[in-house]
Amino acid sequence: MKINVVKNVLEASEALAGANRRRLDEAGVFCVNVLSAPGSGKTALLERTIPALAGEAKTAVLVGDLQTTRDAERLGPLGAQVTQINTGQGCHLSPEEVAGGLDTLDLAGLDYLFIENIGNMVCPAAFDLGEHARAVLLSTPEGDDKVAKYPTLFQSAAVVLLTKVDLLGVLDFRIERVREDLSRVNSAAPFIRLSNRTGEGHEEWLAWLRQRRSAAGRPAAAPRRAAGEEMP
């Protein structure tokens, strides 16, 4: 009986994730689940990404945290739709919480939805939320052994972003070790060196977003005109 209960819960969660994805598909929204340990730079990444896409696409963010609205407060002024989801003691976002978050957004005309998952390298990797792709961040201060220690997180990544690379000259961090470990658990995901402080790697990240959105069957977003600007 206990096995059946667990199986039923997992099946219900997977079904709701599928419903979330269909809802996003029907609205033409490409969704990226952003995962990492705490402090890897998820919010800082979105602080650069949202303005960079502003001229061509509409974005929204579901921000997951145990407590506070601090990350949502950082992203809100950038022009994206932002909804904060606080889980209390939950170590990851659930499909149910994402479904509730979708209810708060105007999906019509939206191009990208970013889910900023709770900072955790274990729990979030196990749950499909209805996203189309996962971006996994690894920051240089965390150390170069995390891919080997947390392979489940990196196995599901569609792209791996090595953040805070501006600190490579200060820290004892071996990129070749990370690449070797990735070759064993996920050789398909692009590996992008990124600095949210200097901007290194951001054009490559944006190109990946555009390519994956197009590959998912979304039409290329046309440049958006400023208010009052006439059609050519």
Image: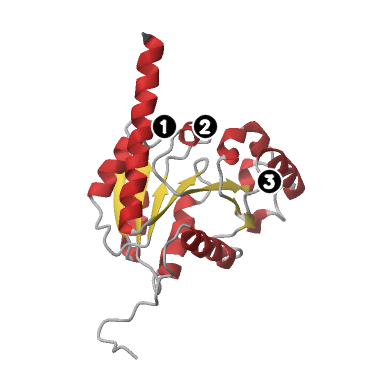
- Between disc 3 and disc 1, whose residue precedes? 1
Binning the other alpha carbons within 10 Å of mark 3 as few (below 14), some (14 to 19) or many (20 upward) gives few
Q: Quadrant of the C terminus?
A: bottom left
Tell me, yes or no, whether the two marked residues, 2 and 1, touch with CB atoms within 8 Å.
yes
Label 3: which residue?
A: 187
Label 1: which residue?
A: 91
Viewer-proximal residue among 152 and 174: 152
Label 2, label 3: how far apart the Cα atoms are: 20 Å
Residue at horizontal 30 percent and vertical 47 percent from the top: 84
Residue at horizontal 31 percent and vertical 54 percent from the top: 26
Residue 77 rendering spot, x and y as whole percentages = 32, 63
Q: Which secondary structure lies at badge 1?
A: loop
Residue 225 rendering spot, x and y as whole percentages = 33, 81
- Quadrant for residue 92, please give it: top left
Q: Nearer the viewer, mark 3 or mark 1?
A: 3
- Quadrant for residue 128, please give it: top left
Label 3, label 1: how far apart the Cα atoms are: 28 Å
216, above or below 172, in the image = below
Label 2: which residue?
A: 122
Mark 3 residue type: Ser
- Quadrant for residue 73, please give it: bottom left
